[in-house]
Image: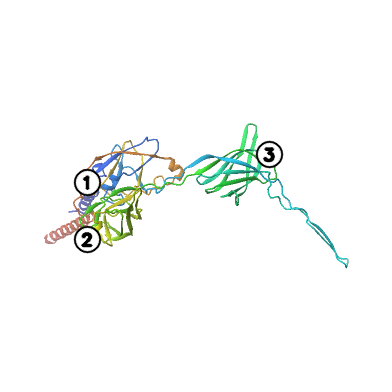
Amino acid sequence: MSVRWLFVSLSCLLVTSVGAAPPSKNDYAQGMSVQASNTQPMIETELPDIVYRQVTRADLGDLRVFNADGVPVPHAICPAPENAASEVVERGLSVFVLRGRDQVYTESTHVNVETSSGTRVDVQESSPPAPEVVSGLIHIIDARDTQPLRSIRFDWSSPDGVSAVKVRIEASDDLDQWRTVVPESTLLLAQQEGRELRRERINLPLREYEYLRVQRVDNGPPLTVNSVTAEEVSQPLEFEPIWFTATRLPAKQGDELMFDAEHVAPVTFARVRLSQENSTASVVLQSRPDETSPWRTRWTGESYVIVSDTVRRESPPARIQPVHDRYWRVQILKDPQVYADSSLELGYRPARVRFLARGDGPFTLAFGSRRAELAKPAACDQLLADVSAADRGRMIEPGYTGPVVNLGGATALKPLPKQTPVKVVVLWAVLVLGVALLVGMALSLLKRVRQP
């Protein structure tokens, strides 16, 4: 047995042991198609509830995206947004013109005092104070019943034909007490050879206003304000979570209710539905990832339901830190037998999957597996990370999921038989072959010694 034979044998062993097949759709229990217009390099879609019912890992490591050729494509998991993006809406506002006092001065003071000793004191005010109102016209903008404003835009002109004027903007809640929000800003309008320069928009501190007062502060004649348009910023709406009712399990003790979420979802909301109306109960909500882990308290508080002739009131949902636990326990601290038929509802906001549209579509979102190689999705903004956030946002188009289809079925949810690690096999092979080599060398040496 030669050393060359030993290395050849080791190489064959390594090739046959290390070579592993790439993941395929059949390694996953179920899947669904993702349709898109395919006009952008990235597609993003929200994960349906069925995904959280089927996956086996909280990090969604048993989820992949395949193209039409069955080749996996790079993907990332994006956390669910809590609020919808704010919208900016333009809205015309009513303008009222008030005539103020053009210039208000205090009369000059001139006092001569001469004492008996001949001393003379002359007191004289050298200059009048600044006027109270610089312009004779005041424009009041009615901003009631508006959402927070971020700017106002003027359609204006000046009787003296100047191209730039300076104005001050004040705010009031009662038309009596005024506070300055923009001490001074410039409106500009210039035309030359068919070209035009405009500055008709003034930014405001983002908040709600009742009334706005606009005055010219550069000693020019009163402005002519034809119209005012405000930019409203809508309040971001909070997304409603997806709710599901946990499955009731037998309880070991009379003061507790046991539940199985049957989801591996990032639960952030919970509510206990009391079975008796006009009731209140102090409860402790606990959870754990499996049947052997210790219970951890997630929330303690009061649940109630009050019913009158026209109104039904229930306690608001409890908000907790995101947790992917499957098993839940509700402990009733007083009179638990009264609320034995109560139920538990859990809520979560689904994540979004973003992937590169590499290859032909339609793409398949495959999920649920205990035998596929662990997927390691990128962070949400790590796909095309070198591209600016604004450009990256323009490269994403929405995708729409189709109906659920079986891929590998229940077989994909069964773990593969435990295999001996490749390193152990290689080490044992090296040891056996090494021993064989030593034995061969010893026998060869022994033959040589016995020769006459």
Rendered image quadrant of residue 303: bottom left
Residue 306 in view here: yes
Q: Amino acid at mark 1?
A: Ala
Q: Residue 203 location in percent, x, y? A: 56, 46
Q: Amino acid at mark 2?
A: Gly
Q: Which callout, 1 or 3, points to the residue nearer the camera?
A: 3
Mark nearer the N terminus (2 vs 1): 2
Element type at mark 2: loop
What residue would you read off at disc 2? 254
What residue would you read off at disc 1? 412
Looking at the image, the residue that sits furthest to the top is 194
Mark nearer the N terminus (1 vs 3): 3
Q: Residue 367 location in percent, x, y? A: 27, 45
User: How far apart in space, not on screen, are marks 2 and 1 (Cα)?
Assistant: 39 Å
The residue nearer to you, when weighing 433 against 153, is 153
Query: Residue at horizontal 88%, vertical 66%?
Result: 118
Mark nearer the N terminus (2 vs 3): 3
The 10 Å Cα crowd at callout 3, few under 14, some 14 to 19, many 20 or more, is: few
The residue nearer to you, when weighing 59 against 270, is 270
Q: Residue 248 location in percent, x, y? A: 23, 53
What residue would you read off at disc 3? 162
Element type at mark 1: helix
Q: Amino acid at mark 3?
A: Val
Where is the N terminus found, in terms of image quarters? bottom left
